[in-house]
Image (cartoon, rainbow, N blue to C red):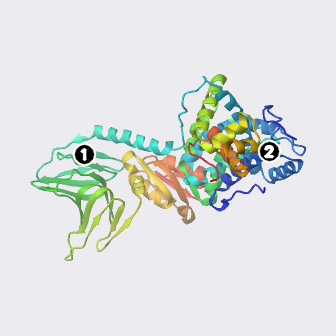
């Protein structure tokens, strides 16, 4: 036999090599192993260190499996093996999210609504969670200001600046609306996030449904949003795109004090961090600005960000006049 | 011509040694000290590298680098060397792709503290090994397990196994190879799913 795996085009290289190694081992321990076979195996092994380590690994497993003989003799029967597996990161993230989440909730203040609206605001780097009397929770991100008015059968929020996450207690008899400039989001049983940038508005729907519309246009243009939908709006127009909800949740990592980047340019990442920190990151080199980064960063640690950029990307990082300057 | 696999002499493994290639100190070291780190290494790679499809390849490349280095001189202590190799490989890849993962850097800093911890008691390791092996066997698909047990425990030939199980010899061959592929992953890796070629 040639030692070739059948479906090589779909397998990662390592798996293919390991499959070959297992096939060699099976032949090696069978009764018809010949000198010739040994020569073929030696040739395969000397082709690359990758072949060698894969073969060593499966042989070591084979030798360890000698102890199967022990296991076959009753009454010895160890307790069932509980797998600790590689899904840790995902489940850990959920657990961590819950912990941080409840920590935030405990620290939340129950605000009584005033008839004529109350203003809530955060400073740069600040975060605040408010719970309205109807149970609706609003989490304000860094540098944010919004007004809340609960009046009669109206629940109205105006986002004047920044970004906020809304988990709305749905009540069809009392519509909940968030107004941003000349746009409005109406809750239809929802979790969503609204962000106001200098040049426009961004709304992402995490759960439930919501309606997005312009408040000023004569034409009643609106969109009904479902989970994963992202609206990007300027004063004159808006577009709806869709992303996996997992990615939306990554974009909401700020709720837990983190920023998650994936193939994000250094320039964009710096811009994000600058929203959270008084100490600003400045990139003076156009090439450096285009370097891409991945990872989870604490939103409030500019120095750590600089250090990682220096260590891994090899860029120069220095503190100058209260700014973190990144150059080539 | 038949050599049994029952003799376990580290450093002169009959499966590995041949006229052309003598089992070396590097091999013995690799099997004894590097392979047992695989579960931790895989978990580290999963955390540090976004594209989970690359993980097996990364692990294999790290092994190749580590083994090649050991052929020159056996690195001591082992664990920091393996993880430093992993780190360098990730950084090389990150530079090549112009992608950097923050977790890789942060994790390694954390590892630097834990690396020199004394290992657990040997009897615990042995018991743990056995439990792992049992778990691995339990999770093998039945045709793989049956063929492997007849080979390992009863020492039957391919032909005898085929007769006993009522399948042809090629199937036996295939099932034993797949059983070993999966078993190696169970014993050394960190995953619970079944590998092997279908």
**Category of crowding for the residue at label 2, using alpha-carbon neighbours closer than 10 angstroms: few (below 14), some (14–19), many (at least 20):** many
Is any atom of residue B119 visible in this view?
no
* Residue A191 percent coordinates (x, y): 29, 53
Q: Nearer the viewer, residue A150 or A326?
A: A150
**Position of A24 compared to B121: left or right?**
right
**Position of A73 compared to A246: left or right?**
right
Chain bearing mark 2: A
Chain bearing mark 1: A
Callout 1: SS: strand
- In this figure, which residue is indicated by the disc labeled 1? A130
Q: Which comes before the other along the chain, label 1 or label 2?
A: 2
At horizontal 57% and vertical 40% (from top left) the residue drawn is B139
**Category of crowding for the residue at label 1, using alpha-carbon neighbours closer than 10 angstroms: few (below 14), some (14–19), many (at least 20):** many
* Residue A213 percent coordinates (x, y): 24, 68
The quarter of the image holding the N terminus of chain B is: top right
Image quarter of residue A65: top right
Between the C-alphas of marks 1 and 2, the distance is 68 Å
**Position of B86 compared to A270: left or right?**
right
- In this figure, which residue is indicated by the disc labeled 2? A28
* Residue A301 percent coordinates (x, y): 46, 46
Which numbered disc covers residue B93?
Answer: none
Q: Nearer the viewer, residue A18 or A28?
A: A28
At horizontal 80% and vertical 50% (from top left) the residue drawn is A45
């Amino acid at each position: 036999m040639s030692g070739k795996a059948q479906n090589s085009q779909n397998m990662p290289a390592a798996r293919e090599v390991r499959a070959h190694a297992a096939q060699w081992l099976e032949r090696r321990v069978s009764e018809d192993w010949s000198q010739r076979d040994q020569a073929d195996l030696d040739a395969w092994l000397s082709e690359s260190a990758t072949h060698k380590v894969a073969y060593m690994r499966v042989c070591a497993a084979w030798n360890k499996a000698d102890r199967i003989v022990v296991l076959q003799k009753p009454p010895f029967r160890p307790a069932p093996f509980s797998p600790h597996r590689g899904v840790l990161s995902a489940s850990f993230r959920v657990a961590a999210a819950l912990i941080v989440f409840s920590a935030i909730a405990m620290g939340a203040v129950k605000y009584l609504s005033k008839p004529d609206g109350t203003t809530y605001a955060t400073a740069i780097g600040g975060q605040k969670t408010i719970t309205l009397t109807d149970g609706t929770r609003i989490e304000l991100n860094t540098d944010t200001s919004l007004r809340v008015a609960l009046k009669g059968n109206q629940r109205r929020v105006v986002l004047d600046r920044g970004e906020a996450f809304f988990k709305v207690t749905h009540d069809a008899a009392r519509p909940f609306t968030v107004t941003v400039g000349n746009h409005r989001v109406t809750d239809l049983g929802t979790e969503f996030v609204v962000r106001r940038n200098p040049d426009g508005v961004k709304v992402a729907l995490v759960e439930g449904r919501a309606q997005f519309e312009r408040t000023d246009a004569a034409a009643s243009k609106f969109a009904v949003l479902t989970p994963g939908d992202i609206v990007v709006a300027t004063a004159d127009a808006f577009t709806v795109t869709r992303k996996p909800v997992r990615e939306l949740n990554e974009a909401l990592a700020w709720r837990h004090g983190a920023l998650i980047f994936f193939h994000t340019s250094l320039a964009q990442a710096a811009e994000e961090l600058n929203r959270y920190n008084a100490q600003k990151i400045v990139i003076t080199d156009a090439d450096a600005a285009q370097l891409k980064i991945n990872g989870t960063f604490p939103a409030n640690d500019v120095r750590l960000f600089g250090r990682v950029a220096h260590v891994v990307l090899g860029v120069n990082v220095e503190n100058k006049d209260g700014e973190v300057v990144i150059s080539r | 011509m038949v050599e049994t696999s029952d003799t376990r002499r580290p450093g002169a493994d009959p499966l590995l040694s041949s006229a052309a290639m003598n089992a070396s100190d590097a091999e013995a070291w690799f099997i004894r000290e590097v392979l047992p780190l695989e579960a931790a290494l895989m978990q580290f790679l999963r955390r540090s590298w976004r594209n989970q499809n690359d993980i097996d390849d990364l692990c294999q490349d790290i092994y190749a680098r580590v083994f090649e280095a050991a052929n020159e001189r056996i690195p001591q202590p082992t664990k920091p060397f393996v993880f430093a190799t992993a780190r360098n490989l990730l950084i090389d890849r990150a530079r090549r792709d112009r992608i950097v993962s923050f977790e890789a850097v942060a994790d390694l800093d954390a590892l630097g503290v834990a690396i020199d911890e004394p290992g657990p008691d040997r009897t615990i390791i042995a018991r743990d090994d056995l439990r792992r092996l049992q778990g691995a066997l339990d999770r093998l698909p039945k045709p793989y397990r049956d063929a492997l047990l007849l080979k390992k425990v009863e020492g039957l030939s391919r032909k005898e196994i085929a007769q006993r199980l009522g399948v042809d010899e090629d199937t036996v061959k295939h099932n034993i190879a797949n059983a070993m592929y999966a078993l190696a992953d169970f014993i050394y890796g960190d995953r619970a799913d079944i590998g092997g070629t279908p």
